[in-house]
Image (spheres, grey):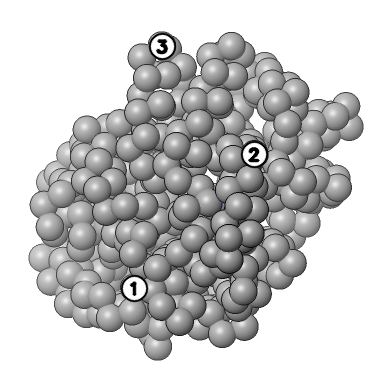
């Protein structure tokens, strides 16, 4: 099976040129002008369109038991939504509860994806406790092809670890060359503030922000950076939302701490007034860290442009507005956290980033694909357009005009946080390892074809 993408404008993290891309089987084999394919080759005309490497979402939740309920997507719906939106690889958080066994949880998460996903996938292994058994199992999980851990400084009692566990996890990561991704918020401050707000009768979704203001996140980052500096481990801050937290990460970098920074498309496009919408509608916009004051958006866009922020994710965690969000109707601390956006990350980033002049095309490709692949040991198999790379390609139509709506989305959730928003451009053809998997907003791929991507640690 072969595929030729003709006459497109190829855009990578650092180059821009017109050429044809020829793929044999699952791999890009030739890039040149005026290629003539052998008979039987599927030809896609990309005239007037961009060709990007397949996009990678470095932080999603598909299988997620959380706050007593289960996130709505499965790999059947989630991978279709991802592909329609130009995302060809998912990195999911494997999140065992503290009482759960690490290896059994890894197997459970893997079994949720294998045989179902239409796109490729791998996991950050959640370290939600650290003892002798867990350590042994983490070593085994790394041998099986995982090169990143995930820890929570928040959610004490559910996922959160204490400082002894944090120190030991970072020491093990340093020894194994694994990067430690971290949710940074000070749990004590969060729980004290939640209790104070509830006692004062402040129960609506808008209070979620007040329970965890920017300083709470900045303290979490500072805390992690101190431990990273002392252990020498490579770290990565997930879903960074505000200037105060970014300042702590930059200060640590200046001291030599190895730290990658991820922000989310939601923080770039939404602000805390959304979570303050009346009649409980704000619950659609509750996630942690919370949506921030709009002043942070330019800080985040500028951070992407200047390379201070490395990657863009979604922290995709879909919970229905009708049936699940109301668990927190009278108590904002019980609202299941998450703003679904797996499907729209790339279209929003293009429309509100590139088309509005906030970032250039190379920053767009780098932060949503190439830098992710490099950070998480997938490059150059993923995140690159070059001979030998997987033929994961996005033919993108910048002349498309449309609107986001729950009515047309593939995510299995009953609302869109971006209902009615304009889009200026979208993926017109998406390929996964040489096979067309989405066309003009419709899924055309093969469920179960997605592969588990083996990774080797490199962060020694
Ligand atoms: Zn998450």
Residue 24 shows in this picture? no
Relative vertical location of residue 157 with respect to residue 439 in this rendering, above or below:
above
The mark total stands at 3
Is residue 187 found left or right of 263 in the rendered image?
right
Q: Residue furthest bottom?
A: 407
Residue 384, image x and y in percent? 34, 42
Relative vertical location of residue 227 with respect to residue 442 in this rendering, above or below:
above
Question: Callout 3: helix, strand or loop?
Answer: loop
Is residue 270 found left or right of 435 in the rendered image?
left
Q: Which residue is mark 3?
A: 255
Q: Which residue is mark 1?
A: 418
- Can you tell which mark lies on residue 188? 2
Identify the residue at horizontal 48%, vertical 39% (top origin).
217
Question: Callout 2: helix, strand or loop?
Answer: helix
Most foreground residue, 361 or 67: 67
Q: Nearer the viewer, mark 3 or mark 2?
A: 2
Q: Of marks 3 and 2, which one's residue comes earlier in the chain?
A: 2
Q: Quadrant of residue 166?
A: top right
Q: Quadrant of residue 130?
A: top right
Residue 260, image x and y in percent? 43, 31
Q: Quadrant of the N terminus?
A: bottom left
Measure the alpha-carbon separation of dots 1 and 3. 39 Å
Residue 228, image x and y in percent? 56, 19
Q: Are marks 3 and 2 in contact (CB under 8 Å)?
A: no
Relative vertical location of residue 234 with respect to residue 346 in this rendering, above or below:
above
Identify the residue at horizontal 76%, vertical 33% (top origin).
138
Q: Quadrant of the C terminus?
A: top right
């Amino acid at each position: 099976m072969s595929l030729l993408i003709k006459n497109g404008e190829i855009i990578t993290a650092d180059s821009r040129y017109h050429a044809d891309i020829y793929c044999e089987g699952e791999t890009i084999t030739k890039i040149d002008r005026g290629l003539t394919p052998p008979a039987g080759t599927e030809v896609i005309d990309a005239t007037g369109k961009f060709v990007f490497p397949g996009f990678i979402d470095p932080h999603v939740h598909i299988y997620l038991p959380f706050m007593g309920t289960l996130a709505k997507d499965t790999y059947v719906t989630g991978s279709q939504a991802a592909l329609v939106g130009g995302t060809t690889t998912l990195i999911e958080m494997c999140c065992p509860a503290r009482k759960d066994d690490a290896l059994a949880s890894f197997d459970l998460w893997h079994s949720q994806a294998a045989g179902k996903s239409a796109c490729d996938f791998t996991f950050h292994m959640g370290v939600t406790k650290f003892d002798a058994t867990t350590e042994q199992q983490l070593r085994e999980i790394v041998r099986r092809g995982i090169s990143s851990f995930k820890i929570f400084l928040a959610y004490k009692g559910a996922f959160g670890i204490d400082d002894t566990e944090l120190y030991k996890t970072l020491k093990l990561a340093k020894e194994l060359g694994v990067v430690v991704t971290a949710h940074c918020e000070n749990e004590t401050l969060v729980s004290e503030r939640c209790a104070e707000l509830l006692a004062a009768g402040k129960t609506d979704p808008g209070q979620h922000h007040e329970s965890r203001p920017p300083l709470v996140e900045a303290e979490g980052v500072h805390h992690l950076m101190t431990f990273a500096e002392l252990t020498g481990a490579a770290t990565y801050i997930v879903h960074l939302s505000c200037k105060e937290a970014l300042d702590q990460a930059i200060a640590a970098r200046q001291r030599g701490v190895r730290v990658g920074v991820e922000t989310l498309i939601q923080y770039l496009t939404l602000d805390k007034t959304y979570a303050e919408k009346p009649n409980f509608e704000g619950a659609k916009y509750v996630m942690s860290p919370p949506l921030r004051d709009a002043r942070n958006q330019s800080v985040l866009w500028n951070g992407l442009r200047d390379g201070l922020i490395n990657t863009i994710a979604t922290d995709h965690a879909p919970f229905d507005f009708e049936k699940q969000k109301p668990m927190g109707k009278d108590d904002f601390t019980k609202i299941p956290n998450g703003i679904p956006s797996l499907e729209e990350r790339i279209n929003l980033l293009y429309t509100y980033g590139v088309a509005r002049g906030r970032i250039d095309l190379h920053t767009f490709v780098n932060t949503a694909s190439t830098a992710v692949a490099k950070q998480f040991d997938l490059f150059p198999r993923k995140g690159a357009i070059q001979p030998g790379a997987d033929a994961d390609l996005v033919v993108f139509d910048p002349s498309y005009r449309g609107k986001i709506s729950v009515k047309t989305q593939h995510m299995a959730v009953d609302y869109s946080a971006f209902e009615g928003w304009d889009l200026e451009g979208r993926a017109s053809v998406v390929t996964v390892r040489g096979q067309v998997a989405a066309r003009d907003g419709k899924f055309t791929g093969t469920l179960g074809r997605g592969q588990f991507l083996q990774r080797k640690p490199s962060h020694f």
